[in-house]
Amino acid sequence: MGSRRNTELFLLIASAFPVILLYALYVTTTGATLSFETLAVPLGLFAAFAAAHIAERILAPGADPAILPIVFVLSGIGITFVTRLKPELAMNQLMILFASIALMVVTLALVRNLDMVRRYKYTFGIIGIVLLLLPMFVGTTIYGSKLWISIPGIGSIQPGEFAKIFIVLFLAGYLSENRELLSISNHKFLGLKIPRFRLLLPLLVVWGVCMAIVAFERDLGSALLFYTVFLMMLYVATGRVSYVVIGILLLFIGGFGMYQIMDHVQVRFNIWLNPFADPQGDGYQLVQSLYSLADGGLVGVGIGRGLSSSIPVVESDFIFSAIGEEMGLLGGAAVLLLFMLFAVRGLTVAARAKSDLAAFIASGLTASISFQAFLIVGGVTRLIPLTGVTLPFMSQGGSSLLASFIIVALLMRAGDEATGRNVELAGTGTGQAEAPTPSLAAAGVSKAGTRIFGAVSGSAVGSHARPGSRVRRRALDTPESGVLGRVALAKRLTREVVLFTGLFALLIGNLTYIQVVMAKTYQEMPNNNHTIAKAAYIKRGSIITSDGVTLAESLQQEDGTYVRSYPNGNMAAHTVGYFSNQYGASGIEASQNETLTGSQDYSSWQNAINSLAGISQPGNSVQLTIDSRIQAAAELALSGKRGAIVVLDPRTGAVLAKASAPSYDNSDVSALMGGTDDGDQSLFDRATQALYTPGSTFKVITLAAALDSGTATLQTTYDSPSEMEIGGAEVVNNKGMDLGTLTLEMAFAYSSNVAFGQVATQVGADSLVNYARSFGYGQSLGQDFSTEASIMPDPSQMTEWELAWAGAGQPVGQGHTPGPQTTVMENAVMVAAIANNGLAMNPYIVAQTLSPTGTVVRTTQPRSLGQAISAAAALDAKEAMLEVVDEGSGSAASIAGVQVAGKTGTAEATNDQVNTAFVGFAPYDTPTVAISVMIENYEEGVDEPAAAIAGKVLAAALAAQGA
């Protein structure tokens, strides 16, 4: 026996390290200095368990060596979190914990032999039922359930916690005497052996009592716990699956009936199905639990740094949510593994028990603890509906703690008796003698080893037995008799081990799903108050331009929180976006949130310690490709207008400027969100999200397709009357101009719709659409931002007339999505590809990521979309675009001393709305800037054309580049 106790001592000492370390981490977060005084709680707890170990050496030297260390770790974690969550209750809980340990020792001293249960089983049963039903009559309703009884001078107790012990003892005594009788089955139905109806009466009685508890005490958890433990014990005792099937069927019938008539059952079930339907009302507890678990992630936020205190009664029913948040998936899984080990060790005790009685006691008590843990953890993790039970050994509360330690004492006693030190293995059967007798007949045992009822001597029968009863039963020879019965019992206990292992594995899998797979989804929910609250204490990194101008930064307030500031007004507001604790984030603030937000850093020992303690690091800064001087010029050009401008470096795809008008004040989003919609759509980024008719700017793609495919050259001639029938309908020139016969180059310069309608039909629908896609149509552009995909229609659905107008840049499709439709960003990518010798580049806006110390963490590398057209075709297209600015419709884009190439466009958005567009690049020989401009509601002769606006912005861009 010494080896068992020595093993237990070693495990206790080993368990002390995580318990003391966990409490030390909590003390550290409070700012206190580590000392024997501040660590008095875990040290005192270890001393109490060490004293219990010494008592166990004397009172139960053969007890299982693993149960006490497991309970020590669970209790240590529990008292740490109760202290952290409810400091005002910590001392009271600690005293109850010490009292529970003492009660465990007293129970061991008083209960020297479990055989006494057989003698007083009915007494225990009556006590258990009375305790279970007592709150119906004198109970106090707390949190909607009538579970507690108030005792003056003591407080509230929950008699149901003690009832489960007495009921398990009664059931163990009853089943040990009647297991053979209950295992008899005379009928078969669908392959199941169905017991006689009168043998189903105990199941029906227990079912009725549990339904009464749900109805009158409104206690779903206790009812489900008692009923499940009874079913488990009944199966372990009889081996009849039919009892389990019938029991589960009754459970569903009762659950459905209660759902129909009991409001609180409906509420629990509906919360489980969708807690987010009422996140501030009925679903609040569960929603907050999920938010906490999602924050925990893999390693947790650190002891004392979680926000689980927002969960009502978190120290009791939802203490596991706090553990999962602050210790992470690893800590939460460790707790579940400890409960799994408790179940395995408890059922191992049952398998080694000296008698059926001891085996049933051990299995029933183990199931009551283990299944209770499954119920509450499954509820707070939304695996099953919430039931409202406590987490054994860990939740705040006296009744549960006292009852749990009594159970531990009884398991120790069962384990000690299992060694057979004083008594040999007892057989099975009803009314069995407590000691072996010389004669089988005298003991009432048949040759098969089964019990003959009524043949037991009076000395062997307890006070509730009836010696000499007139009722004599025939000898029972069943598979549950004798040694074979013990073998069958051991197999069923093994199945129960597998069951509990599977249940806790399921909990760990579900916890992984919440804390890893769904974590980001939960954290990004708009109503997640945890994310909102935590964001206020995080110093986000800055957002700066390529020339060092700060667009966004975080300023610390007196209370330690940070406020987002935008020191340069609304510059690049749509690009930078906004960050609001109430409304979330957009733009770079959203797409680079993980970079800007402080994150865990294990690059040094100090950083690693801070990360483990949950101390976040300042966020990294983001340097954009945007040049503040070019951006300012673009925004000035858009002043008082509606539209967008994009400026790219054609060599790399870097966004040098991106402006959208009207803009908004990103430092006061709440005013914008809370105001009325005036139709301005100022939050809408027209540069990347708006789809426009490209007008004649699309002729750049039509020209490129014709040149690259060999369909035409710049010198190919076309007739360009004021209108021409193509595909059975008219294609007309702008203002009905008759341009006569002209070369393709001049048709491009004068933007002839008729000529380019002919070119498009020569290129063909399939070819034109494919060329458009090579320039970026049909995909969301941007390495680090998103754009609305520009649209080209399905070529198989295009008529010849639709194709002609598409080649001229006007979508006229019927019965399908018309095209072309483009974004301002797509137009910029298209013209940049021409400037870059036909190579299209995927645009990007983040140049570098910088650490808080200024070190470059990451640099964005340019990426191409592919060679849209050959360099030779691009050179010809550049020449034609130069002619547009020098001699054609784009002369307003001219810059003194610099050759500018481009293409104008006038697009009819609706019958009464015309937009003006321009795409171009400069300098012509070595392009360093490409531009796309789109202005809405253009009135010729009144408003400034897009070409003139582009010329101003290009001049500013070239000046900024020093060209």
Image (cartoon, helix red, strand yellow):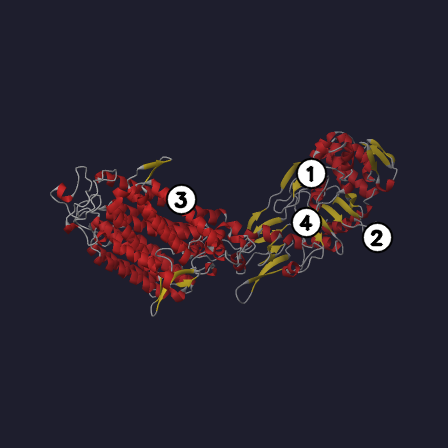
Q: Nearer the viewer, residue 470 or 934?
A: 470
Task: Check disc 2 and give the amino acid type.
Answer: Val
Q: Earlier in the sequence, mark 4 or mark 3?
A: 3
Q: Which mark is residue 249?
A: 3
Task: Check disc 4 and give the amino acid type.
Answer: Leu
Q: CA distance from mark 4 to mark 2?
A: 29 Å
Q: CA distance from mark 2 to mark 3?
A: 81 Å
Q: Earlier in the sequence, mark 4 or mark 1?
A: 4
Where disc 1 sits, the SS reads loop
Q: Earlier in the sequence, mark 4 or mark 2?
A: 4
Q: Earlier in the sequence, mark 1 or mark 3?
A: 3
Asked if residue 702 lies left or right of residue 356, the reply is: right
User: Can you tell which of label 1 and label 3 is closer to the viewer?
Assistant: 3
State whether residue 525 appears in this view: yes
Task: Check disc 3 and give the amino acid type.
Answer: Leu
Q: Are discs 4 and 2 less than 8 Å apart at CB?
A: no
Name the residue that disc number 4 marks.
Answer: 656
Give the crowd class for mark 4: few <14, some 14-19, many >=20 residues within 10 Å: many
Name the residue that disc number 1 marks.
Answer: 775
Give the crowd class for mark 1: few <14, some 14-19, many >=20 residues within 10 Å: many
